[in-house]
Amino acid sequence: MTDSVRDALRAEVVDDAFTLAAYPESETPFISSKDDAKDGLDDMEDALFDLHEMMFAAKERAVLLVLQGTDASGKNGTIKHVVRLVNPAGVKIASFGEPTEEEKQHHFLWRIKREVPGPGMLGVFDRSHYEDVLVPIAEQTLDDDTVAERFEEIRSFEADLVDRGVTVVKCLLHISYDEQRERFLRRLRRHDKRWKFRESDLDTRRLWDRYRLAYGRVVQETSTEDAPWYIVPSDHKWYRNWAVARLLIESWEDMDLSYPQPDLDLDALRAALEDPA
Amino acid sequence: MTDSVRDALRAEVVDDAFTLAAYPESETPFISSKDDAKDGLDDMEDALFDLHEMMFAAKERAVLLVLQGTDASGKNGTIKHVVRLVNPAGVKIASFGEPTEEEKQHHFLWRIKREVPGPGMLGVFDRSHYEDVLVPIAEQTLDDDTVAERFEEIRSFEADLVDRGVTVVKCLLHISYDEQRERFLRRLRRHDKRWKFRESDLDTRRLWDRYRLAYGRVVQETSTEDAPWYIVPSDHKWYRNWAVARLLIESWEDMDLSYPQPDLDLDALRAALEDPA
């Protein structure tokens, strides 16, 4: 058995087909309890910080963390609990809501491309270009040819990122219908969370099965060798945080990072510093 | 005596004159020891998070935290230790290095205006438009009229921000010549910090007194009623972190923030959620 979380969570597209039904939302590969996950995340803190800082210092590679999932699946929670562990100066977060009027005038990748992380950065997409295929598929608002074209453009956009040294980590935060209900009820109960709830969230929930199928289709069409999807079981928040942290660490470990060592004449510099003004 | 850190650290421009010489770099108003500062910062964590989250949720007001100071004054450290305490989804950090060729083609405020925080956001400037007056003054590369014009444009740019509901918190991270030497030596010693050191940092250090005077001039010209400068004694990192956190909290407290309470029919929503799909 592998101990790679990427291997364990990578979506398996078999014979060009993929279904989310095969992925339990509450399983916790490698992790036996909440404490176990929390200890694991604590243990990863230094490595997360250092690996990210090395990438930031070297300004060559980059990571794009794509967070997708239904309402209340934990996109913001992942940012709060995992992304917050690294140096914020090297992080660029972009949230993609419904396109604005200006955005609608442009190609659907226009607003996305403007937010691609530059060299050294960890970019985080809170929702992403995948909304532009998920919603039309689930709500049946685009014809098949246009959807197929968008898939092709997404694959080519991501392949181009990978070519430029950006590792694309696509996480589907996978929660169950029941867990979403619990989280919605909690939001309604808490005065400091209620603002996150919109009536339209219930409309989307009513299309649960159609969105499930749409997600399956998206994974099937866009889980490529270089930019695979990871299905992150997310009914347990502690597992989700642990798993996303591991996915980032494994991605950074692949980059063979180290702190740049500038070619400095250390003795001369030290002597110059000891001199009075 | 007031217990407002803003009142205590606000730059005092008297008779149109200001000099940094009157501000000790290692004093620690309100704080008696490193432990005291660390406990204070711990105690502020929840308030920082909540106040920022309320502003983020309401999407009306914004804060622009401007971090200025010489090399090694702790701009990045402040981001790491203070800014990291709030929800990263509501933070936008911009670092301004030497202008690129593209940026040089534009007005000096062009790249600045693109990074102004939108409603609800905490914007952080790691260096800022102030570089465009500090450097020319210290290095004597611009004539007086042009400098005066830039000051005028900066005052009007910031007044406009304040009119639009953006609180501008300008922090001069104030370190001594000796402390900078210690920090440079530490950077040279540590393999994970050496990448931050550039030979040109020493050239700037040689112009220490001229930069001091330039900072004095900048404060004198741009410390306005609505967008004052705070001189943050920064020889002690723990004091700097504590003080910047307090400045943010006091700014947010002025906004009378609360979590938005959307007008929802809670009973109906709960009933709808209990229904099967």
Image (tube, coloured by chain):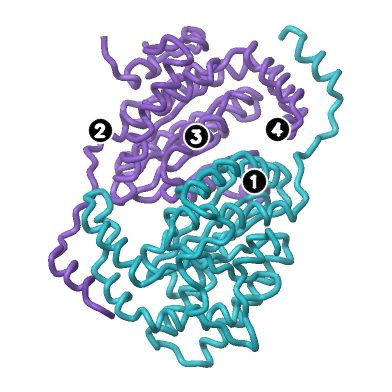
Chain colours: A cyan, B purple
Q: Secondary structure at mark 2?
A: loop
Q: Point out residue A34 in the picture as x, y percentages from the top left corner.
A: 46, 50
Q: Is residue B30 left or right of residue B76?
A: left
Give yes or no for contact between labels 3 and 4 (Cβ–Cβ under 8 Å): no
A256, A263: nearer the viewer: A256
Q: Secondary structure at mark 1?
A: helix
Q: Point out residue B224 in the picture as x, y percentages from the top left corner.
A: 36, 26
Residue to which mark 1 is pinned: A52
Which residue is painted at 44% across and 35% down in the image?
A: B65
Which residue is painted at 73% across and 45% down in the image?
A: A58
Q: Is residue B32 left or right of residue B252?
A: right
| C-alpha distance separating marks 2 and 1 | 36 Å
Disc with the residue nearer the chain's start (4 vs 2) = 4
Mark 1: give few (<14), some (14-19) or many (20+) Cα within 10 Å: many
| C-alpha distance separating marks 3 and 2 | 30 Å
Mark 3: which amino acid? Arg
Residue to which mark 4 is pinned: B196
Which residue is painted at 40% across and 31% down in the image?
A: B169
Residue to which mark 2 is pinned: B254
Residue to which mark 3 is pinned: B150
| C-alpha distance separating marks 4 and 2 | 37 Å
Disc with the residue nearer the chain's start (3 vs 4) = 3
Give yes or no for contact between labels 3 and 2 (Cβ–Cβ under 8 Å): no
